[in-house]
Image (cartoon, helix red, strand yellow):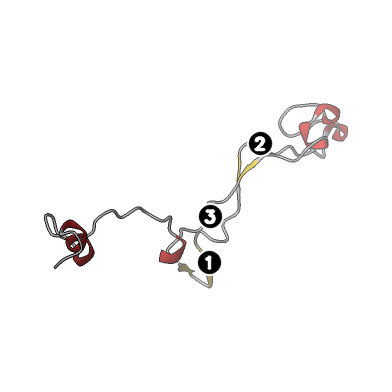
Amino acid sequence: MVVPDGRRWVWSRRNAKPVPLAPRHRRTWRRGRRWCSCGLRWLACPDRHGSVPTEPPTPPPNNRWWDEPTRANPQIGRVGWLTPAQTWRANGGRW
């Protein structure tokens, strides 16, 4: 679904950026660049070893009927009614 945002159009869910689950570590440019913005010394900052984990965006909903899971449907007809084949078998092969 497209939502107007004043001067441009914004895609609501499909192009949503992932939500970070941890604080991002940035090197501060004061104090000799040794400290991260989170308070850790830059040498021990976790950003040096791996990226910040993020929550993946939600997949779009499945609205196509042919991709839905198959469900068992044991219903043959109305309750108490038999199909012609069941009537044939019940009468021993005679109508």
Q: Earlier in the sequence, mark 3 or mark 1?
A: 1
Q: Which of the two discs, 3 and 2, sits closer to the camera?
A: 3
- Amino acid on which the number 3 mark rests in the picture: Pro
The residue beneath circle 1 is 10
- Amino acid on which the number 1 mark rests in the picture: Val
Left or right: where 29 falls relative to 54: right
Front position in the image: 22 or 79: 79
Residue extending furthest toward the right = 32
Residue 27: quarter of image: top right
Q: Residues within 10 Å of mark 2 (few under 14, many from 20)?
A: few
Front position in the image: 47 or 27: 47
Disc on res. 23: 2
Q: Is residue 2 above or below residue 37?
A: below
Q: Position of residue 5 (x, y in %)?
A: 49, 67
State the residue at coordinates (64%, 43%): 54
Left or right: where 51 falls relative to 66: right
Residue extending furthest toward the left = 80
Q: Earlier in the sequence, mark 2 or mark 1?
A: 1
Left or right: where 12 falls relative to 74: right
State the residue at coordinates (56%, 56%): 16
Quadrant where the C terminus sits is bottom left
Q: Secondary structure at mark 2?
A: loop
Residue 64 in sight here:
no
CA distance for labels 3 and 2: 24 Å
State the residue at coordinates (28%, 53%): 74
Q: Secondary structure at mark 1?
A: strand
CA distance for labels 2 and 1: 26 Å
The residue beneath circle 3 is 59
Front position in the image: 75 or 14: 75
